[in-house]
Amino acid sequence: MKRSTKERIINWVLFSVMLIVAFFMLVPFFWMFSTSLKAVGEVFEYPPRWIPSTFHWENYKRVWTVVPFGRYLLNSLIVSGSITILHLIVASMSAYAFSRLSFPGRDKLFLLYLATLMVPGQVTMIPNFILIKIFGWTDTYIGLILPNVFTAFGVFLLRQFFMTIPKDYEDAARIDGASRFYVFSRIVVPLSLPAVSTLAIFTFVFQWNNLLWPLIVVSKDYMKTITIGLASFQGMYGTSWNLLMAAAVIGILPSVIAFLIGQRYLIKGITLTGLKG
Amino acid sequence: MTLKGKETAAAWFFLLPGFIGFCIFVFGAVVISLGLSFLEWDMLTQPKFVGLQNYLRLITQDKTFHLVLKNTVIFVLGTVPARLFLGLIFALALVRNIPARAFFRAAIFLPVIIPTVAAAMVFRWIFNADFGLLNEFLYNVGISNLPRWLSQPKWALMAIIILSVWKDVGFSTVLFMAGLQGIPSSLYEAAWLDGANRWKSFVHITLPLLSPTTFFVIVINVISSFQIFDQAYVLTGGGPGNATNTIVYYIYNNAFQWFRMGYASAVAWLLFAIIFIATFIQFRYQKKWVYYE
């Protein structure tokens, strides 16, 4: 058999296998959406019905009015957005100092930053909670945001990237009288846009999905983020599967939409950085 | 000011915002956490110094800790090889020019980005013993003795493993795809001309050249699996009994349900030690199998 024919056959075999894989990957999404539109009686019907006989869109309305999901989503947006912006500022400035400037103790300090990458978040979580409590920042945005801004991963990632930018650009601008901050904000950061945007996406997604930290600093309903909002909704409506699934759909929708728009970029970013949040 | 002094000053201008935060929320927190682990403290009464007591109790007496440790290790051993194996297979298929490739990649990767909480809610429904989709499927393929997934200890941990593999296999897949795409195709051509078959090329070219990626995938999967919490929190609440209680869940309960801050900190440091040792061992043995050009 010709080699190319063989390749084609293999590709079609693999295609069939991947079709089954894709089925198993997507069926939970389909099932979630299908259940979310069912009437209570239909949820427990046997055999299960793939497509609801009538679409009960009012399940969504009910979920949305019983629990302030709009507020939860807004909180998540504010918290994840602020963490992302602050982390980008802090990480890029630190990375600039570590990659472009020389000062006594630089390498040792960088190593210290790097070492913190090995420390699991659960170690710092308890002292940070105590600190937030002392400052009276539980149930506040600042309490949700501030301790999550400082992670060494972004510093490390951006430093690696900044080092690949030729120093000539910077020297030329400096000779023309540009300040270091100008060089940093107008030359180095714009030239690093792929790395900066990857870091932004990751930070945002990771924080949007964060459960543990909001869980410990938030107790008031109006400060809940979407993750703990979903978890507590499950606590209240343990077996109202249609409502639970409607809530879950609300919970994943922003991520799914963002993914469908930016998936090419996101996957490229993972390849580039090799790290999940 | 000298030129050098000027540069140092500039460096600190850039470093300072981050440095202050790091000193408080990272470096400071690590030191305080270590200090806390030698205390007995409920955040209300006066803290009491107990030396190594917390650690000794955890290691020698605390049966629950031994159980959560065992659960977590089983979870790691269950998820990491599955994610590795499936991730590699999926990647091998997806780097080829198969039809609908972009769709498959999206399907496999989609679960990675959604909140674990939402994924776990759906799986709680799918795993439902009486009306769940999974048991329905198993029944239809002829299995009559259906597991009660979330209420039987041996199956509950399995359920969490299945959810976690489903959720994050796409991440390993994407990393493997990147690794595979980095292998020059000229090598395969040369091997083919030399008469090597597919299996031989896979064993002698793909696997060795992919080994740095494989190593990386294992290391990060092991680290993240040891920190499992969300899945257990939503899917089982750690139950039945303590069957799906994990190390991080135990830290959470100790610190934020029972307010044993010192004890919880000691657990966190043991987790740190476990992750550190697991990672160290992997780095130590990478020379034996990881191929760097």
Image (cartoon, coloured by chain):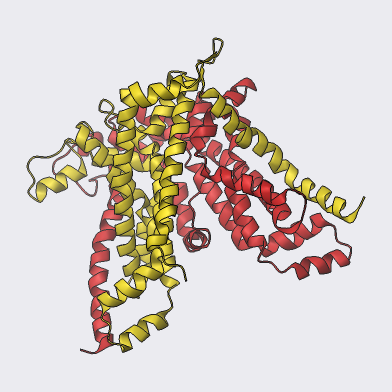
Chain colours: A red, B yellow
Report x, y in % for residue A112. 63, 44
Instruction: Give the residue at x 41% y 49%.
Output: B281
Q: Residue furthest top?
A: B45
Report x, y in % for residue A98. 70, 53
Q: Is residue A161 above or below residue A211?
A: below
Q: Nearer the viewer, residue A135 or B98?
A: A135
Q: Is residue A17 above or below residue A123?
A: below
Q: Is residue A67 above or below residue A23?
A: above
Q: Look at the image and tell me whether residue A48 can be seen.
A: no
Report x, y in % for residue A171. 81, 67
Quarter holding residue B178: bottom left
- Looking at the image, residue B104 sits to the left or right of residue A213; the answer is left
Q: Nearer the viewer, residue A178 or A24?
A: A178
Quarter holding residue B270: top left
Report x, y in % for residue A22. 29, 59
- Looking at the image, residue A132 sits to the left or right of residue B144; the answer is right
Q: Residue furthest right?
A: B1
Q: Look at the image and tell me whether residue A125 can be seen.
A: yes
For the image, the number of numbered tags is 0
Quarter holding residue B230: top left
Q: Is residue B110 above or below residue B251?
A: below
In the rendered image, which quarter contains the N terminus of chain A?
A: bottom left
Instruction: Give the residue at x 28% y 27%.
Output: B242
Instruction: Give the residue at x 15% y 48%.
Output: B137
Instruction: Give the residue at x 62% y 45%.
Output: A113
